[in-house]
Amino acid sequence: MGRAAGASAWILFREPDFGRFFTARFLSGSALQMQNVAVGWLVYDLTGSALALGLAGLAAFLPAIGLALVAGHVADRFDRRKVLTAAYAGNAAAACGLVLCALAGERSIWLIYALIVVAGSSRAFGNPASQALLPNLVARPLLGRAITLAATSWQSATVLGPAAGGLLYVFGPQVVFGTAAAFFTAASLCVATLRHRPAPSESRAMSWTSILAGIGFIRSRPVLLGAVSLDLFAVLLGGATALLPIYAQTILHTGPVGLGLLRSMPGAGAVMMSVFLATRPLERRTGRVLFAAIVAFGLATIGFGLSENIALSMAALFVAGAADTVNVVVRQTLVQAETPDEMRGRVAAVNTVFIGASNELGEFESGVLAAWLGAVPAVVIGGAGTIVVAALWIRLFPELWRRDRLIE
């Protein structure tokens, strides 16, 4: 059974378009992670402020929430391949801007924030197009495994990207940003060579009714609403990523290389879990497994917050990454499998807002709380909050708790 499942998962790579999509995800993810390491270290080096790190997360999040609904409509009205190609190109342009800042010795934190906004705007259009495009590349019976493998490519990037970013930072931030620009450009070319798959365009013009259709669709389905909102609040409270430069510099006493290793650990755990789920996909008791993973994520976050040992901190982040991957695979599969193709862009856009809120806004929340209380209390309180949210969501969304099969 396990061997057959594994074979059916890896057979997806016989389809060239899926291979290119997988490669583009890896390249863009690596570029983003390298860039995040360099930006985080540069911002903290310039300011020495936890709040400044939080503001960097906010600068990345604001375009995601401000443009998401329009971006989802674009993904449903235009060729998703072209939208994603342009989005990766926009990220490459922002990375080039950061290169110029580094080479010029630019010390203005606001210019860095502005370039983060440009990159965030590009991702705002790219994320729903990417999520909506994937189901068109594979047969429906293989969709769950395709989503898991796509997550594997992204999570592999979160392992290698931060470590590479930390190592390259030794040669200067411009080297990191230049490498990220090259990777984003390569990802854009990969997507541009996919076979033409036009999105199912609606005949109606853009209107508030069509733009908000994704929100209405998710609200009408308690399982989807529960899954995406659980991710929003649980990961928002438990996100400690923005504070890693503080832990690396003042608590664990490591440099940029240590920061890169810490950032890699959630991705390493995620890769291991992704490979496991690709070969042994969830069959039954999906809801209970999801909530167990959220609780494990919260406990691992608390463990990281209390640790003063680099090995223990890395282990806690590894467990957190593995647990979060279960959440990612379940949520993404539910959203993409239960949404009609003509609405996937708009529903994916709403899902992207929730993901962005849980990540970038979570970084802002962690930065603000750390500025008030200190880094350690901020992380521990966030992890405890994640566990409380899981318990509350079991009561609020019993349909999600009782969900048996992932794809019905």
Image (cartoon, rainbow, N blue to C red):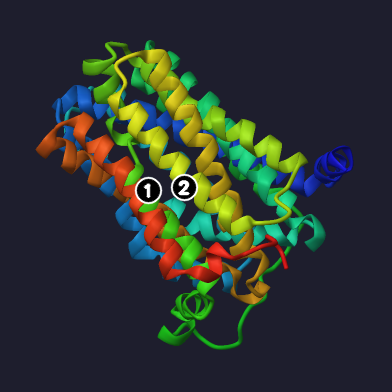
Query: Which corner quadrant of the image does residue 76 belong to?
Result: bottom right
Q: Residue at x 75, y 42 (%)?
A: 280
Q: Residue at x 64, y 76 (%)?
A: 342
**Could you say where residue 193 lies in the image, as x and y percent from the top left?**
72, 48
Total marks in image: 2
**Could you say where residue 133 lies in the image, as x and y percent from the top left?**
66, 59
Q: Where the C terminus falls, by quadrant?
A: bottom right
Instruction: Determine whether, in the image, residue 143 is placed left or right of residue 243.
Output: right
**Could you say where residue 344 lies in the image, as x and y percent from the top left?**
60, 69
Instruction: Determine whether, in the image, residue 318 is placed left or right of residue 94.
Output: right
Query: Which corner quadrant of the image does residue 22 belong to?
Result: top right
Instruction: Determine whether, in the image, residue 346 is placed left or right of residue 66.
Output: right
* Pointer 1 local density, CA inside 10 Å: few below 14, some 14–19, many at least 20: many
Give the SS element for disc 2.
Answer: helix
Residue identifier under label 1:
387
Residue 294 image label: 2
Q: Are marks 2 and 1 in contact (CB under 8 Å)?
A: yes
Q: Is residue 48 above or below residue 280?
A: above
Q: Which one is in front, 109 or 255?
A: 255
Q: Residue at x 45, y 86 (%)?
A: 209
Residue 132 image label: none
How far apart are the alpha carbons under marks 2 and 1? 7 Å
Q: Which one is in front, 357 or 114?
A: 357
Give the SS element for disc 1.
Answer: helix
Q: Which one is in front, 310 or 170?
A: 310
User: What amino acid is labelled 2 in the image?
Assistant: Ile
Query: Which of the two discs, 2 and 1, labels the residue nearer the N terminus?
Result: 2
